[in-house]
């Protein structure tokens, strides 16, 4: 049996990995860290040169020298291919393979950096009419419109099946809104998809274990969850 430990900085994208493991029915240990006050605490920083979450430790083959993997996208691929019998992925022979790959990479490659760019613009300028904010916001709206159009004609991002592409993307429009607020008024297909995906037992169980204090209903609401409040 796989011996996996997930290191998760609470209120963050590390939630993707417990979600995936619950969906696949693969047991894991979970090590939780609190933000200090916004970034990783020293005990997480010292585990990996980048010091960010999530981290996966795999002690299945060598308990003294476990494999340590960062980057949520890489971790998702690793788990699916090594322990998940390729479930929640779409094979290259499937007509939706290109859609799967595109949407699997969309969250970390496009949506998330786009949201962070607007967050930075918001910190930089005092007036939201400033063209730097406006430009960043226009990119956010374009990304949301693109996603909404996709979900208006497909139940899930890769097509009719729930896949890892959904697991990678959900946090950007739930928990991440605690850092960069997004009003989802008018994005009805995204809101319906959020409901569909987050009611899955895998999501509910993972979130209870990884972030029991988060209000999941607020996370999928039109206005989004309340802003992040540091504990330390
Ligand atoms: N591209 C990385 C990003 C990892 C990342 O920046 N994680 C955030 C949590 S949302 C973090 O650890 N922030 C704390 C820090 O950088 O100190 C991934 O997908 O895993």
Image (cartoon, rainbow, N blue to C red):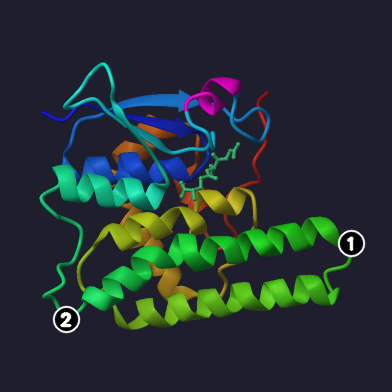
Residue at mark 2 = 95
Counting labels gives: 2
Residue 182's image quarter? bottom right
Residue at mark 1 = 126
First-in-chain label (2 vs 1):
2
> What percent of the width, then of the height, locates residue 221?
51, 58
Q: Is residue 206 above or below residue 133?
A: above
Res 156 seen here: no
- Quarter that holds the C terminus: top right
Does 148 lie within the magenta span? no
Q: Residue furthest right?
A: 126
Label number found at residue 72: none
Residue in the image at 35% along x and 72% along y: 102
Residue in the image at 53% along x and 39% along y: 11
- Quarter that holds the N terminus: top left
> What percent of the width, then of the height, locates residue 124?
83, 59
Residue 62's image quarter? top left
> What percent of the width, then of the height, locates residue 142?
57, 80
The verdict on label 1 being within 8 Å of ligand 1 is: no
Q: Secondary structure at mark 2?
A: loop
Residue in the image at 50% along x and 57% along y: 172
Q: Is residue 171 above or below residue 83?
A: below
Q: Which residues are magenta?
A: 42-47
> What percent of the width, then of the height, locates residue 148?
44, 77
**What is the magenta segment's predominant secondary structure?**
helix
Taking depth in this image into account, of 111 and 189 the one nearest to the observer is 111
Q: Nearer the viewer, mark 2 or mark 1?
A: 2
Taking depth in this image into account, of 92 and 154 the one nearest to the observer is 92
Q: Is residue 211 above or below residue 192?
A: above
Residue in the image at 78% along x and 60% along y: 122
């Amino acid at each position: 049996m796989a011996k996996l430990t997930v290191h998760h900085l609470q209120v963050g994208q590390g939630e993707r990995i417990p979600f995936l493991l619950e969906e696949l029915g693969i047991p894991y240990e979970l090590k939780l860290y609190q933000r200090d006050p916004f970034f990783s605490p020293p005990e997480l920083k010292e585990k990996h040169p980048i010091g960010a979450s999530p981290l996966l430790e795999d002690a299945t083959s060598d308990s003294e020298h476990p494999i340590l993997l960062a980057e949520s996208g890489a971790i998702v691929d690793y788990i699916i291919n090594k322990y998940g019998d390729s479930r929640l992925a779409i094979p290259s022979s499937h007509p939706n393979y290109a859609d799967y790959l595109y949407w699997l990479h969309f969250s970390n490659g496009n949506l998330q950096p786009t949201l962070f760019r607007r967050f930075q613009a918001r910190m930089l300028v005092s007036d939201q009419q400033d063209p730097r904010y406006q430009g960043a916001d226009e990119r956010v709206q374009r990304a949301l419109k693109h996603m909404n159009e996709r979900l208006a004609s497909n139940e899930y991002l890769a097509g009719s099946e729930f896949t890892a592409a959904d697991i990678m993307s959900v946090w950007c429009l739930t928990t991440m809104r605690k850092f960069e607020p997004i009003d989802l008024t008018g994005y009805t297909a995204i809101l319906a998809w959020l409901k569909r995906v987050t009611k899955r037992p895998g999501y509910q169980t993972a979130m209870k274990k990884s972030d029991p204090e988060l209000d999941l209903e607020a996370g999928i609401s039109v206005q989004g969850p309340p802003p992040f409040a540091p504990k330390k």
